[in-house]
Image: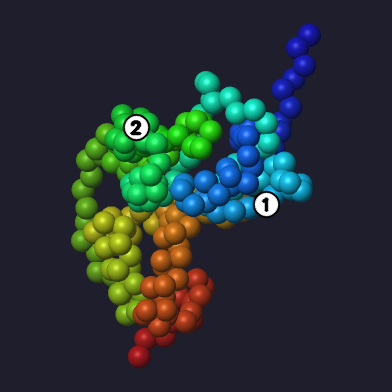
Amino acid sequence: MTNPIPDVECELHHATLAVSDVVAAVDFYTAKLGFKRGFTWGDPPRIAGVNLGDVSIHLKAGVPDPRGCSVYFVIGDADELFEFQRASGIDVVRAPQDKPWGLREYAVRDLHGYELGFGHRLPNAQPALEIERVQLTVRLEKRLAALLQDLAKHKRMDLSSCLEEMALHSFESVGDGVSSPHSRRALEYIQELKKKHDIDYDAHASYRFVER
């Protein structure tokens, strides 16, 4: 009799790479690859964590063995990170290329020979979807309208496509909330736009809007 597969919740996972010098590896990942220093443990350090956005990778003292081993990161902008890494003198395995599976990706090698892949999703990778748009008369709060125009320009979209993206994402539930079309960096940029346009209200303010 086969035991039933348990329904497991997994909050985090950490790839772990064996390195001959933990301190040197941390320095390499932070100075050359664009990671942030997370933690070190031991004196001298036997294991350390470095972060790329919300993803952490562990570097553990041991004998490096990069054969048949690679780690892949899906990020916001692969071209931007690639330019930083190339300027840092990284060993480039493959330059950025658009792939048929919907990612623009590249690969480099770290200090100990491990291959690291980075890629961002291509928004137009799926087949075109023919639609018919209709003209709507929409009135928006003046400062919010200005923010949306700046945001659309930042995302290289027209305003209609930007609003469609946000509407469609709001229809998809994620946990107790809804999906967001914005990356963490985009959300940080939105906060900058809110300051630029003096928007001092929160997400529920539309219920309180009264026109002059």
Which SS class for mark 2? strand
Residue 67, above or below 209: above
Mark 2 is on which residue type? Arg
Q: Is residue 171 visible?
A: no
Packing grade of label 2 (10 A; few <14, some 14-19, many >=20) is: few
Q: Pick the residue in front: 18 or 156.
A: 18
Residue at figure coordinates x 26%, y 63% from the top left? 153
Of labels 2 and 1, earlier in sequence is: 1
- Where residue 170 appears, x then y in whole percent? 46, 55
What residue does disc 1 label? 39
Q: Quadrant of the C terminus?
A: bottom left
Q: CA distance from mark 2 to mark 1?
A: 30 Å
Residue at figure coordinates x 41%, y 72% from the top left? 192
Residue 111, above or below 161: above
Residue 94: mark in rendering: 2
Which SS class for mark 1? strand
Q: Is residue 83 visible?
A: yes
- Where residue 152 appears, x then y in whole percent? 29, 62
Outermost residue, top side: 1
Packing grade of label 1 (10 A; few <14, some 14-19, many >=20) is: few
Q: Pick the residue in front: 116 or 212.
A: 116
- Where residue 68 appears, x then y in whole percent? 52, 21
**In the displayed structure image, the side of residue 167 where residue 30 appears, left or right:** right
- Where residue 63 appears, x then y in whole percent? 64, 28
Q: Pick the residue in front: 14 or 121.
A: 14
Residue at figure coordinates x 30%, y 75% from the top left? 146
Q: Pick the residue in front: 99 or 126.
A: 99
Residue at figure coordinates x 53%, y 21% from the top left? 67
- Label 1 near label 2: C-beta < 8 Å? no
Residue 94, above or below 205: above
Mark 1 is on which residue type? Phe
